[in-house]
Image: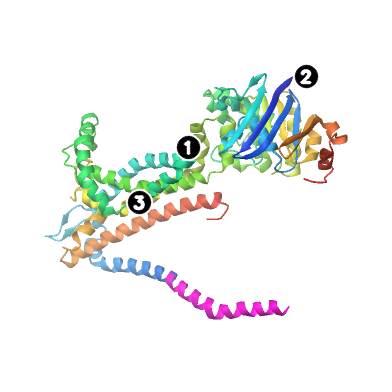
Amino acid sequence: MQNKITVEALNAWFGAKHVLKNINLCFQENRITAIIGPSGCGKSTFIRCLNRMHEVVPHAKISGTVLVDGRDIYENGTDPVDIRRCIGMVFQKPNPFPTMSIYDNVAAGLKLNGVKDKRILDKAVEESLKKAALWDEVKNDLNKSGVSLSGGQQQRLCIARALAVEPRIILFDEPCSALDPISTSKIEDLMIDLKEKYTLVIVTHNMQQAARVSDFTAFFLMGEMIEFGDTKQIFKNPKEKSTEDYITGRFG
Amino acid sequence: MDSSKFSFSRIGRSKLSGDLIFEVVVGFFALGIIVLAFLLFRELFVGSSLSRDTFGTGFLATSTWDPVNEVFGALPFIFGTLVSSFLALIIAVPFSIGIAVYLSELAPEKLKYPLSFTIELLAAVPSVIIGLWGIFILAPFIRDYLAPPLSTYLGFLPLFQGPMYGLSMLTGGVILAIMIIPITSSISREVIMTVPTHQREAALALGATGWETTRIAVLPYARSGIFGAVILGFGRAIGETMAVTMVIGNSPRISESLFSPSYTMASVIANEFVEATSNLYISSLVEIGLLLLLISVIINIIARVLVWRLLKVEGGGRV
């Protein structure tokens, strides 16, 4: 199995606050890697470093390398816009564009890339919604507003929107924290389906979720990566004391 | 237990003595405003009765304004007010949205505060000063540098035909535009700042550039509030008196050309009230005042509702 993303000596700051300290981590292709840890441990910041979203926050700084297929996304002269077009992201709060229809939400990324052909757009919208397991629920309402859907449907709409531009990697930043258990389980099933074609990274607060969906797990604490390994090993037989304390609920 | 009882009775007593008087006094002030607004409206209504009885609805539709023979029609003033305000909007809206987007999305932190401060300061310049500047600088500038190319290149349009002497509908519109940019841009900026970060990030994560993010995520989200800001600017332009009176030429006629002088509702009241001698003359001016009040109240209500709705929904009910 191949390493899709390799993170080397990654450090990140907000102003003077050092939020990520020397992180080294690899993500395998067609696998789900979960990042767990208590609030404020830097896991969201970390995932936002993988598609250069960290730097959109004022006063944010970063150092180190992130190799995607061997190429450093922080290399001089690399446009973050190009990076983000290849690496999709799904956020904590479902954030469809409220003034756009379901169709236009999914097509938004393609339109940004200059796709105008209606047939190509129709096909991509249908395929993306099918991959996001939303097609059957919305196929007759494609012109309705994206925010007319339930929270879980909105999140799947956001996943469809990310899939439409055909990224190879999708980052999920606590995608289920605003959803009910049924919607959550739909998204989890969806992620397991998606790993056939994509490399997935998920940040989660919910340890059961990490255990259910991921192949590998990294545990973060206070801006450092404490432990990384096979998910089963991390949950059954953690090497570090603090990992064990966290997953058994002693803090966090 | 004793101490809690003691403080409880203190609250009760202070409510009786201080709070009650306070409530009555401030309540009186607040009610006073409503009474005042009502009296204002009533005064205009009663004062215009002679004119309304004499001319009926024809007052709104005829364009003779002849104090000597006592024939009055308000159409040229309604025309002048609406066209100059609309012209002001056409000029001010792109500037205002540009300023608002720059200040909320792009400007470096160090520039943001001084820039918005300066723009809001522009709103504090007395209208007569802007009018003077309009007479001495803007009107000659438009006459010498803006009108000639307009009539050369766009002269086939009736809008840009005829002689241009400086004081004109066009000059009035430009002055009004300058005067409404501060309010339109600062309210648009506030509205844009209520667009949640997650909307911008949704666009950025799809690979949108800064401009694309503004276009697909920020402006559509803020559009009803920006529309409200624009309408609020329109309301201000309609009521503006001094500066526009000084540069619009004050001639009650309806012309297709923006180069010809015009007259607004506010200007005619300001200019002619002192010299209006007959009752019908005065009553006709009062009726123009009533119309002006109605138009601006309606426009302001529409604008406030639009802005308020957006701020309320997006500000989590704080506004």
User: Pointer 3 indicates a residue of which chain?
Assistant: B
Residue in front for this viewpoint, A220 or B285: A220
B7 inside magenta stretch: yes
Query: Which image quadrant is residue A80 in?
Result: top right
Residue in front for this viewpoint, B140 or B217: B140
Name which residue lies at 77% across and 19% down: A1
What is the span of residues highlighted in magenta in the rendered image? B1-29
Label 1: state its secondary structure.
helix
Furthest-right residue in this view: A237
Are dots 3 and 2 on a single chain?
A: no
C-alpha distance separating marks 1 and 2: 43 Å
Query: Which image quadrant is residue A73 in?
Result: top right
Label 2: state its secondary structure.
loop
Horizontally, is A115 left or right of B75 in the view? right
The spot of residue B88 in percent (x, y) is: 31, 44
Above or below, B5 against B286 in this view is below
B118 inside magenta stretch: no
Q: Is residue B264 visible?
A: no
Furthest-front residue in this view: A16
Count of picture labels:
3
C-alpha distance separating marks 3 and 2: 65 Å
In the picture, the disc for residue A1 is 2
Which SS does the magenta portion mostly show?
helix
User: Pointer 2 indicates a residue of which chain?
Assistant: A
Q: Which residue is mark 1?
A: B106
